[in-house]
Amino acid sequence: MSYPVTKRRATLFVTCIVDQVYPSIGQATVRLLEDQGVAVDVPRGLTCCGQMAFNAGFRDESYAVAARTIELLHGRGDVILPSGSCAAMIRHLYHELFAHSPYADRAADLIGRTYELTEYLVDVLGVTDVGARYPGRITYHDACHGLRFLGVSRQARTLLEHVAGAESLPLPGCTECCGFGGLFAVKQHAISEAMLERKLAGIAATEADLLVTGDASCMTQIAGGLSRTQSSVRACHIAELLANMHDARP
C-alpha cells in the first residue's frame, strides 16, 4: 500500500463495540485522521484489548488477549482509539497486567504511543478545528474512563467549540457516570437505571437536541434511555459529529 506524504502514521484500534455494532464510528475516525494528513492502518486480526475479561476477574484470559494485542501493534506507530475506556485499559492497566512478564517492555512501549482520539487530535496534532458543521444545540457527556484515567475533557470541548453552526450547552452532572460501566449495568441493573435516569434529566434540562460523547458504550446506554422515554434528543459519538457523518440514533 502506498501513502501520500503525511505528518505521521497511525494505527486505528477498532474497539469491539465499534467493530461489531457501530462501524461508522471507525470510518469517521479514519476520515478525521486522514484529513489531518495521517496515514491510517488497521491490522488484520486485531480484536479486544482484554478489558472485559480483566474487569470480570479473568486475569489469565485477559493476559492472553492483551498479549496478542501487543504483538499485533508492535512497531506500528501511534495507536488511536475512539474510546477512552479501551485506551485506559492499555495506558493504565497493561502496567499491572504485564508487570514482571516477558511482555513488560513491549507493553511499556505500546502504553507510550497509545491515545484516545480527541486527545490525539488536540494534544499531539495540535488541531482545534476539523471543519465540522452542525446546525443545532449540542451538549457533551464525559465518559468515565476517558475523564478519570486519561484526563480527556478539555480536548473534546475544544473541538466541539469549533463546530460551525453549533451551540454548545453545558450538561448538568456532565462528569457523572451514565450507569453503563460494562458488567456493572448487568450485575447492578437497578443502580444502573437510577444513574441513567439522573443523566437523562440533566440532558433534558439543557434543551439540546444532540448529546455527544466519546465512548460508544456510553452512547448506547444514553441513546437507549432517550429512546425509551421518547425523547426528541439524539445521541452520537464525537467522531461522527466531527467528521460530518452524524446520523444520531433513535
Image (spheres, grey):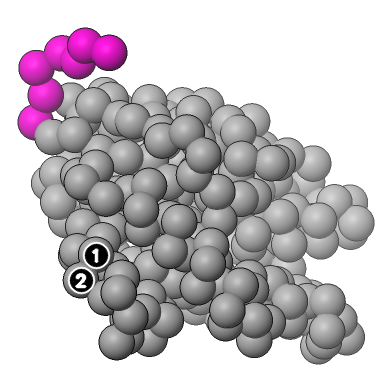
| Residue 208 visible in image | no
The x, y position of residue 164, in whole percent, is: 35, 33
Residue type, mark 1 in image: Arg
Q: Which residues are magenta?
A: 1-7
Residue 111 to residue 44: above or below: below
Name which residue lies at 57% across and 82% down: 59
Residue 149 to residue 26: above or below: below
Q: Are marks 1 and 2 in contact (CB under 8 Å)?
A: yes
Return the residue at label 2.
105
- How far, Cα to Cα, is label 1 from label 2? 4 Å
Q: Residues within 10 Å of mark 2 (few under 14, many from 20)?
A: some
Return the residue at label 1.
106
| Magenta span contains residue 154 | no
Task: State whether the magenta stretch is mostly helix, strand or loop.
Answer: loop
- Looking at the rendered image, the quarter that the N terminus falls into is top left
Name which residue lies at 55% across and 56% down: 48
Residue type, mark 2 in image: Asp
Residue 207: quadrant of the picture? bottom right
- Looking at the rendered image, the quarter that the C terminus falls into is top right
| Pick the front one: 140 or 115 | 115
